[in-house]
Amino acid sequence: MPPLLHQLWQSALAEEHALQQDLTDLRERVERRFETLLGNPTLVRDLFGFTRAHEPILVAPRFALVSRAPDVREVLEQDAVFSVTEVYAAKMESTTGDFVLGMSAETAQYERERTLMQDVLRPDDLDTIEQFVGETAEALVRQAEPTGEMDVVSGLSRVVPSRLVGHYFGTPGPDEPTLMRWMRAIFRDIFLNLANDPGTSAEGTAAGKELNTYLDALIAARKPQVVADPEAYDDFLSRLLKVQAAGPARLDDSTVRRILGGIIVGAVDTNSKAIAQAVDQLLDRPDQLQAAQAAAAAADPGLAAYIWEALRFNPQNPFLLRHCERDYTLAAGTPRARTIPAGSLVLVGTMSAMFDPEVVPDPDTFRLDRPVDVYLHFGDGPHMCFGRHIAGRLIPTVARALLRRPGLRRADGPDGKIRYDGAFPDAFRVRFEAAP
């Protein structure tokens, strides 16, 4: 266990008079170091492993930490009690505007806009998306073949989702670097800036204004094109505009912009992180890497099982945040039941749930026979990730392009380890057999 956590917990357990102050400090520590915590899987596993064994529902002043799988799911399914609104809504309003991820699932607006998004995202799109992603990833890796070395993040995992945002959602940005900058700055402010760092907030707000100006102009330009030739445009933006044309009262321009902004902000860095961290975990396991490479070379759909299991050891979202709206007894009727007071920030350990030995047999072993519902990579409940079906195709497909290369290994020295920008993988170099 890392020294900081070991000291904190030993103090709390050994000196009862110090317990109240230590727990009061815990929320402040989590808020101040939240993004760093997200980039440190060992620290997260130690923290949740300790609480799962000793205090599965840890309740502190204005803060709670939930680590057992049944309790994690209970929190995520009880949206009226454990809400997202207090956590995300204000920051979304200052950047992309209202989005379903920051709305109560009990509201008519949530139901209306979630249904609209589901109608626009068609099931048969997934095959088209997978084909585009596969061809794009393959082309990027092929460019690196003469040297046999590439940066997984800047050369692949961040590029492919960005290009999908342009190709499928119809919002390529003025250029790729600008789009990437917007996505990271806005995502960081909404989801990672718990301490409300003013510099992070300013960058997120500025990026949101630039994004919204761009989207407003794009919507205005696309509307007459869609009306003039509806068959020529079939990306996500154009489909929203076709819905608008069929019934303007249901969908105004600001709603189109809010939906687009909310979706694409979560489409780049989270997928990039998942790809990089899954590959990183496989490189740590030579036997599993060899088997995954064989599956990739054979275009075996079973490759996905390697990716999801690898990602379990370092998921893109090791925990989620909720705000407790009223006093609520979690795990009622069990010996571990605890009442979480209204106003508490709740750290929901999705990674911890995937290591709960009560529901995940042999959790520390890499296994391919786990039921799909063990994995909480995309959350659970009414706010389960809207883009999970797209990500479910994108992540393994991008990884496949890299895993197909013989001799895949880390680059020498520190470059062969993931370097993080806060919670985001920012550089990660690998080598493979060069091709003429």
Image (cartoon, grey):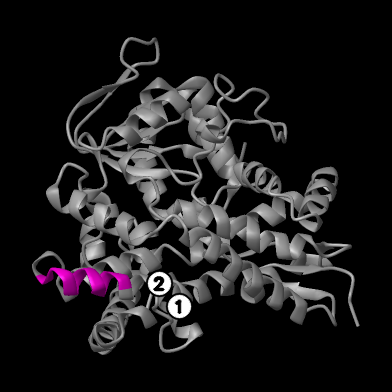
x and y percent of residue 233 in the render?
37, 80
Amino acid at circle 1: Gly
Q: Quadrant of the C terminus?
A: bottom right
Mark 1, other Cα within 10 Å: few <14 / some 14–19 / many ≥20: some
Can you tell which quarter of the image residue 63 is in? Answer: top left
Q: Identify the amino acid type marked 2.
A: Phe
Residue 270 vs residue 234, the one in the foreground? 234
Residue at left 33%, top 32%?
75
Is residue 13 shown above or below 272? above
Where disc 1 sits, the SS reads helix
Q: Is residue 362 left or right of residue 264?
A: right
Residue 18 can be seen, yes or no? no
Foreground pick, 66 / 301: 301
Q: Residue, x 65% and y 48% (percent of image)?
A: 304
**Magenta span includes 402:** no
Check if residue 243 falls in the magenta segment: yes
Q: Which mark is residue 169?
A: 2
Q: Secondary structure at mark 2?
A: loop
Out of 316 and 335, give the one closest to the viewer. 316
Quarter of the image for residue 179 reads: bottom left
- Is residue 197 in view? yes
Span highlighted in magenta in the image: 239-248
Q: Which residue is mark 1?
A: 166
Say left or right for 89 vs 434: left
Are discs 2 and 1 less than 8 Å apart at CB? yes
